[in-house]
Amino acid sequence: MLELSYSLGGFPLNGVPLGLKDEEDHTQSFSSTPSSSSSSLSSPSSISSPVVIHTSSKGRILTRSVSHFDESKSYTERMDELLLSSSLRRENTLDGKGNDFVTKRTTSISGSRGAPFIVLPKEERFEILREKGRFAVDIGGTLVKLVYSSVGPPDGDGTTDLLLNFRKFQSIEYCIDFLKDVWQDRNSECYLNGTGGGSFKYAELLQKELGVKVKRTDEMLSLITGCDFLLRNNEDESFTYHHEAEGLERYQYKPIEEKAIYPFLLVNIGTGISVLKVDSPTSFSRVGGSTMGGGAFIGLGNLLTSARSFDELLLLAEKGDHRQVDSLVSDIYGGDYDHLGLAAEVIAGSFGKCSTLNHRRAQGLCEDAKEEDIAKSLLLMISNTIGQMAFLYSNRFEMRRIYFGGFFIRKHPISMRTLSYAINYWSKGVCEALFLKHEGYLGAVGSFLDMTEEQKKE
């Protein structure tokens, strides 16, 4: 069991900074802005008091102390750190048929040596890592994700666990500097496993700076392999998001029995969107996708607002009221449209009110649209489209479990809330939107697990 001890300056202890704070109380209908009925919440930048994480496993205590969250880190990095180091409430575990079961898998842990980690299973293939560590990177267009092995501190009886550590970097240069520091026993015969487009782009740089060989692994295969490994071995890997709850209660783990993991749909939202139908670790196919992904969001955001990064755009969206620029059902019908079951607050047309903006401004009926409102409308437009598309694919292939991953999610409450509501709304509660604790690291983990014969001999 992992315990998180914290205090928040100016906030009650149950006001964990993972939600949103709106000035007005808005309805909970599909596509509307978040409710402010919960207690006051803020972003992780509000945390100023020490965070102390105590992790107990097999009778030992491991402690990680953090004097404060690094203010130089983005909102996403702080959110990622908090979630990976938190013990969330666990929902009933299912066997794929709706039946509860008691899991016998060992819960993985996190929060040591300055980086989150999980304990690797006690399998023969990993024992070689006690003598020589292994490193793998997933180099995307936005972030560099690194996973690497290490040996944990000894138990009372002298036994040690093998750990898999997780780190993210904003640039390849930062990652290289870190690798130079921690990979002390590397030599020209060592391999750095890599996946993602950057493993091609930066292969020569990595070889030159680190003096190692670069072994590239297929991006899609690494993604699925990493997802399979984490779902099988990390009991608390998948979780659901519940906006109506407060604090960490909004994030609830959803373990699943190993034999019931497959099939599932994996919606990977990066620059574009790929929808993968996964039947087993080795049987999967890309069944569809869309260009309306993270690239469209940040691209249009740059054109329409002053934001110059993904996180800046999300922060603008938090403060916005999309009703100032979107046309709602109530704007057309004066209220609910009962015949079709459409509530007054449902969005009828994204940016619909902007079509008459100049005319209404000339009549003194409105002011210029605020960029916060534009960012909120843009985020909802993209998220709602992704959610509906994901449901249609799940319905086509009769998939009840839909996992969302990719840098667009970023464990951000607005993204997860909108996707969760969309799946619940369109499936009438039959399907759930599932998120992965280590979603940004799936490719890196899959690459880590791929060993050449030479690596095995090492």
Image: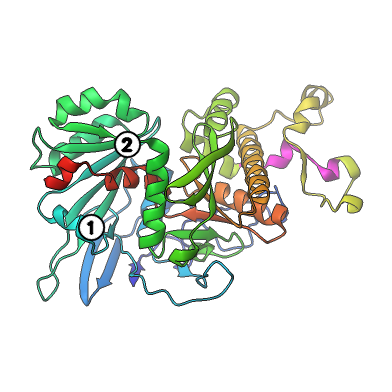
Tell me residue 130's x, y (percent). 13, 56
- The amino acid beneath tag 2 is Thr
Asked whether, in this view, residue 414 is left or right of residue 328, the answer is left
Tell me residue 438's x, y (percent). 39, 51
The earlier-in-sequence mark between 2 and 1 is 1
Asked whether, in this view, residue 101 is left or right of residue 215, the answer is right
Label 2: how many Cα within 10 Å (few below 14, some 14–19, many 20+): many
Tell me residue 30's x, y (percent). 71, 51
Asked whether, in this view, residue 157 is left or right of residue 439, the answer is left
Residue at 59% over, 63% down? 38
Nearest the viewer among 109 and 3 is 109
Residue of label 1: 163
Tell me residue 18's x, y (percent). 48, 56
Q: Is residue 226 at least partly visible in the picture?
A: yes
Asked whether, in this view, residue 304 is left or right of residue 42, the answer is right
Q: Mark 2 vs mark 1: give the one in front.
A: 2
Which segment is the magenta one? 320-331
Nearest the viewer among 209 and 394 is 394
Nearest the viewer among 405 and 22 is 405
Q: In the rendered view, tell whether residue 2 sits above or below residue 191.
A: below
Q: Is residue 148 magenta?
A: no
- The amino acid beneath tag 1 is Leu
Q: Quadrant of the C terminus?
A: top left
Residue at 52% over, 35% down? 313
Residue 427 placement: quadrant: bottom right
Q: Is residue 327 magenta?
A: yes
Q: Quadrant of the N terminus?
A: bottom left
Q: Secondary structure at mark 2?
A: loop
Number of the label disc, if any, that sits on residue 217: 2
Number of the label disc, if any, that sits on residue 111: none
